Image (cartoon, rainbow, N blue to C red):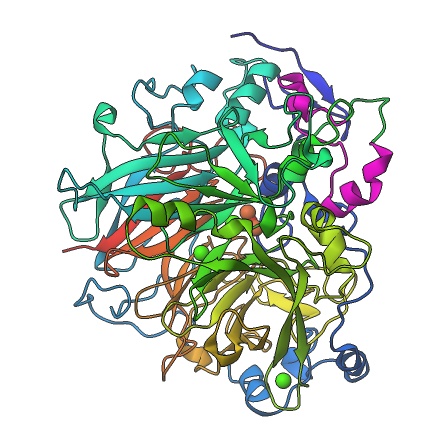
Amino acid sequence: MTCTPARPVASQGITAPAGRTLLPLTPTGTRHGGRSFMTCQYRCGNACDHPEPNRTGHGHVQDEIAKAVARRSVLKGAAAGSGVMVLGGTLAAAAVAPAAADPTGPTTARPVSGDLATAAFTPVRPNRRDAVVTPSGFDHDVVIRWGDGVVAGAPAFDVRRQSPEAAKQQFGYNCDYVGVLPLRDAKRDRKDRSLLVVNHEYTDEALMFPAGVYSDTEITAIAMANHGMSVVEIRRGSRAGSWRRVKSLKKTRHNRRVHIDTAFVLDGPAAGDERLRTSADPSGTTVLGTLNNCAGGTTPWGTVLSGEENFNQYFDLPSGEQLDQRYTDAYARYGITGSGRGWSAVDPRFDLAAEPHEPHRFGWVVELDPYEPDEAPVKHTMLGRFKHEGANVALTRDGRAVAYMGDDERGDYLYKFVSRDSMRTGPSARARRHNKTLLTAGTLYVAKLVGDGTEDGQYDGTGEWLPLCDETTSFVPGMSVADVLLFTRLAADKLAPTRMDRPEDVEPNPVNGKVYAALTNNSQRGSTFQPDEANPLTSSMVRSSIGAPLTPAAGNRNGYVLEMTPAGSDHGAGTFTWDLMLVCGDPEAPETYFAGFDKSQVSPISCPDNVAFDDRGNLWISTDGNALGSNDGVFRVPVTGAERGRVTQFLTVPRGAEACGPLVADDNRSLWVAVQHPGEVDGATFEDQASTWPHSDDFPRPSVVVAFRDR
Ligand code: FEO
Ligand code: CA
Ligand code: CA
Ligand code: CA
């Protein structure tokens, strides 16, 4: 290991400490939500600082309403500055409801059931603890941490002896998506085992590496190897709903670490396109690695989908070089600027001047079959290229696969894909092979939402899925099928879909057939973006810390949960109706709305990110970037009946972390949560950490936990 001298960080004119990250140091304070500058820099390359990639002027489905809002402004009095669109009826009544007496809702005794769908529990209150906090009567286990061995032969983790080779055998950094699949084994009774599949979205070099131990190049190479995915065999713990990883790695047959050198197959209509070819891959069909994998979904045929999200930030442009002018518009629309992370020093394919096509090989939905550890994972070009949060699959009435997807950028779109062929049932190898082709042919759509006016007291309306292309035909004038799939954002712009407030997880509810999308926030709604009925808030109430007064802030700061009902209750339908089921925030804030539920009985919630369902159809929401002063967490929300809209906080994650996953599994007895970036608080360094969770070391380790009833 070598030390490097202090060196200037060009972008800010400040000096990085010896042995410190290649990235520029971050200023302190908070940004959108409660998210730190540090998270913004490491996770998405400060996307918020860059010019809005979607420069189209369309998408204002309720321009007349927007104008009316501008004229009539907002509710008076306490609502002044809240930016809520003027509504009559129930929503307006909710908006001016008295201040909540107890925003964390009623208290109950110890839960009598371990069924997370029905258990009554005392909601977890907003807090800033450096801990995973569950309600009284529940407990949690840490199942796997950053650095724990994944494949046989993995060296023991030592934060001062990290290497790329070790990282490729260990659990990567910043776990995000969590899938749990039953381990089917005809020869051995393995009912007590399952496969845990997890994404590793990004790295935070300031928290991962002690100063003075590693060279910049070593830091970069190790960080690169900490991206990807892990497949880990797990077994039941001693308490119902608890699980632990199988530690005898030699006895695991499915454990796998997908990393920066893992070969992926590109399939679908755009595979092999000239714009996907590089000097290392003249066929344009094989890509090494997957980047910035955020959320995902487990398919009905037993594979895992994973979204490549902020992939644009990994490509460097050496000084004196220019971006390839053939791709000026495309690079701009995806935020590919050449302001990368220095990876080209380790692997020249991340040099945009040398390999202008390499970025085109990221931004896809990935499919991984965890039951086939030797099979190359696939990047499906048919599902389009954008900043994929994830993809979740439901079936049409005739058995075709429908993947719902969000493009996580301010002002970007909701998408869905409907397969041409139907899923085959049964466990045969032939059926599985067929089902793994479903995402290669079908139709890709983008969503347009139209409000029906706010006089009805609801943010609601109708929606249409606008076809972009199928596997042989483009429906976008002037663009081929490959054009549409490679540059999906540019294609969608031409159809004037609705510009949303950062679509994150989009997931069908298997019980009621509706589809739920987390629209996490957009601080620029009302400035860069005009409001519409689906994105109504131009300001919202935030807190600087727990107990501080609510104050207005520009834009939509706390996010929404959008509920979509497919026409005829068929996911294949071309139209739908929609409503904003939740307008998130503190229940004392006048703009908030919890599906009409009594605001004195709900927990404050801010910045919904990932959604999941238990097997009774309750919605579970994890948050990222709390704008109300609390740590992030996980919430349960019934979507039907008298309890519809009752937001109840079940869990909080440690200081600086975001809650990812979540997943309710094992007959509602297990809640899986990925605790991502604990301690990612501005100013924190390896030597001066803001968190030491899970408290096994003197530095934080992103980890997957499972919560369950404590018997
Ligand atoms: Fe990785 Fe869209 O959050
Ligand atoms: Ca309405
Ligand atoms: Ca997230
Ligand atoms: Ca989800």
Hey, which residue is sitting farthest top in the picture? 2
Q: Which is nearer the eye, 571 or 558? A: 571
Q: Does 425 appear above or below 79? A: above
Work out which quarter of the rendered image holds the C terminus and state it: bottom left
Picture residue at 36% right of the left edge, 69% below the top: 618
Picture residue at 42% right of the left edge, 14% below the top: 161
Q: Does 131 appear above or below 709? A: above
Decide whether residue 454 is among the magenta residues.
no
Left or right relative to 386: residue 292: left
Picture residue at 66% right of the left edge, 64% below the top: 467
Q: Which is nearer the eye, 653 or 100? A: 653
Q: Is residue 12 visible?
A: yes
Q: Is residue 26 visible?
A: no
Number of numbered markers: 0
Toward which corner of the image does residue 675 lie, by quadrant?
top left
Residue 316 in picture, x, y percent from top left: 72, 27
Q: Read off the magenta span.
A: 324-352
Residue 583 in picture, x, y percent from top left: 55, 72
Residue 346 in picture, x, y percent from top left: 62, 17
Left or right relative to 382: residue 368: left
Q: Which is nearer the eye, 586 or 500? A: 500
